[in-house]
Image: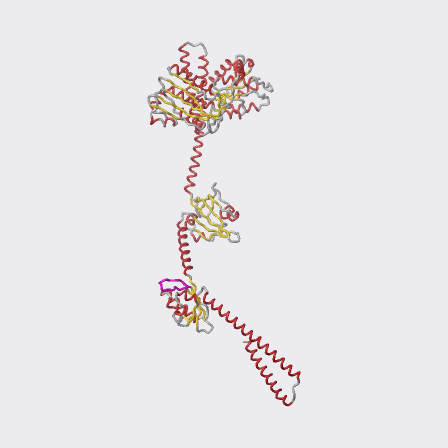
Amino acid sequence: MRNNVSDLENKVILRQRAEELQHKKNLSAKSKISEVEALKLIHELEVHQIELEMQKEELIYAKEQAEIAIQKYTELYDFAPTGYFTLNSSGKIIELNLAGSQLLNKERSKLIDSPFGFYISNDTKLVFNRFLEQVFTVDEKECCEVNLLLENCKTINIYLTGILSENKKEALITAVDITQLKLTETALRESEQRYRYLLDNLDVGIILHNRDTSINFSNPKASALIGLSKEQIIEKQSLNPTWKFIKEDYNILPVESYPVNQIINTKKALKNFIIGIQKPESLSFNWVLLNGFPVFNSYGSIAEVVMSFIEITELKKLQIELTNAKEQAEAANKAKSSFLTNMSHEIRTPLNGIIGFTDLLMKSHLNHNQTEYMNIVNESATILIEIINNILDFSKIESGKLELNIEEVNLFELTHHVVDIFKYHADLNKIDLALHIDTTVPNYIFVDSIRLKQILVNLIGNALKFTKTGSVQLKITSTINIENEKYSNLHFSVKDTGIGIKKENQEKIFHSFIQEDSSITRKFGGTGLGLAISNQLLGLMDSKLELKSTYGIGSEFFFTVALERSNFKPTLENESVKKEVEIKVISAEDCVGKKILVVEDNKINMLLVKTLLKSILPGCIVLEASDGEKAIKMYKKEKLDLILMDIQMPHKNGYQTTAEIKHLKKYNNIPIIALTAGIMLGEKEKCLESGMDDYVAKPIIRRNLEEVLYKWLKKEPSNENN
């Protein structure tokens, strides 16, 4: 517009100048125009001509820009993703863009002058009519959601936005397809309903805490466990809850240790936290297993805390019951151990006297019948000792307290000794007892000699027990262990020609306290522990006992165990030293005049120990004390060389007596040897820890007592007591 005004003004100016020039030309007829004035006039005309050309170029450029803008607007209008419609007051389409025609699925030319409401579904037509009326009535933007019903019976959801045009005669409408959005909203709503249903019906309490620990959500299970309604729980803070949290020790949990506070303070999840919830105005409480974790916002701060908990009240009660049962079982186990210890002591104490004195009697001048009777008494007592040992071994194995003592062993000597134990009994019953050792078997091996001997004694003893005629053979063969060449696989077999075992009973004989049948027990006797203990001992050696048996023909018990071979080779020098030591032990020439105090409350055992001491050390002086207090008085009074101390005594036991003696100012480090009938695991260690120097088990074996006496009496005490 401005350029048009300028053009008009220039035309007026040019007109005026042209008229002036014409006027001057007319005057020139009367008077001549100067040459200078003519040149100025020509210059001005040229300048105005240039200006007119520049203005023409500007007009052409402006027209081109306007055409470009119109083209861009048309493209934006037509190809915009939103449908644009221009409607008159009656709802007819005056103008629409390409997106609008595509939305209605018709050509644009066919939609002009057609009513827009024709394409609205019946269920939303009322909404559209109200919307159109509002657009023409209220000079503000209006919105609504309607459904379009297309030719292929397809329904889509659209969102309409309308505003009145400047001339107030037309409505400018935008239409956006929100079908997918509505489907998503529906899916989200259904998902929310589904998960809300799950939360409401879960048997797990769920609580959401805000950053300030207040509660903004809880499900019905949480309300039931806490004892408050959903409305009562909401907005409760951990600082002022109406319920109480109880620790596992039944004390009140401090506020700073509340689960939500722990999570907020540490910013870490809380897992498997056991806590009790005491309901309001109630003395009872529920135990729950709680888990929680923080939810962080985009800034890395905690937005909320999610807590879940399940009720474990019944499990907690069961745990308490199990704990009580465990304590009772442990108490019962301690009582059993105490009973076995006392039983061992009480039974072994009189057996000590029986075996000791029968052994002494058999070495005296007896006639044939007396010797036979003494042998029977001694053998019976020995069998009783073996039964006690089996019961105690079984108890130790069951509790897992039995350990193997691996040492270098002469396998040939050990097996010959085992066979020699039964040789007399076998010859007496006219049974051929044989030992066969293959040439490949190593002479020296590393093994627990006591336990291996115990296994072989059990197997051979059983074989002889159930064999009336024929033979019993112990056979040992060997092969090299493929995994480790230092080891040999030793195969032990005890084969007999006895009564055999029925096939249906071959499995149960390895169970504790069970024999093949009750008639066998009545006829042959026994506890039924021998095979069970042997098998358990072999289990400690990574082996097991196996059986081949034919009823009425015989049985073969066998096992294979991997044992390390020893490179030890005996020499003549070693054998001579061994014999020299044995001579020194039994001669005891250095022990003449030695004072030995025997502390023993049992008169029979006291007599036995005194008798053995006089027999082993004829020149020694034996003093007596029947309890710990008398032993201490005797120590203060006499100059002693050795004390043999019983463990279980009245007033003061052996441990207490030893401790008091060692704390005396005049204690001169004389050896104190324990004499005890207790053989439970740790008995020897307990004696040594209490300050005793050595240990002799009852029943007392003469050879064991000889070795201990020789070992300690040749050591002179460092200081003398007065």
Q: Which residues are magenta?
A: 145-158
Where is residue 210 drawn, in percent x and y? Answer: 49, 52
| Count of numbered badges drawn on the protein | 0
Q: Nearer the viewer, residue 525 or 5?
A: 5
In which quadrant of the rendered view does residue 471 lie?
Answer: top left
The N terminus, quarter of image: bottom right
Where is residue 247 drawn, in percent x and y? Answer: 48, 43
Classify residue 297 as left or right of residue 37.
left
- Residue 272 vertical placement versus 8 (above, below): above
In which quadrant of the rendered view does residue 169 lie?
Answer: bottom left
Where is residue 112 drawn, in percent x and y? Answer: 40, 71
Q: Nearer the viewer, residue 707 or 429?
A: 429
Classify residue 206 as left or right of residue 519.
right
Classify residue 495 as left or right of residue 712.
left
Where is residue 641 drawn, in percent x and y? Answer: 56, 17
Task: Judge whether residue 577 can be spotted in this image.
Answer: yes
Residue 470 included in the magenta stretch of the image: no
- Residue 86 vertical placement versus 615 (above, below): below
- Residue 177 vertical placement versus 280 (above, below): below
Q: Nearer the viewer, residue 106 or 591?
A: 106
Magenta stretch, main secondary structure, is strand
Q: How is the image coloured?
A: secondary structure
The C terminus, quarter of image: top right
In which quadrant of the rendered view does residue 364 lie?
Answer: top left
Task: Judge whether residue 337 can be spotted in this image.
Answer: no
Q: Nearer the viewer, residue 690 or 395?
A: 395
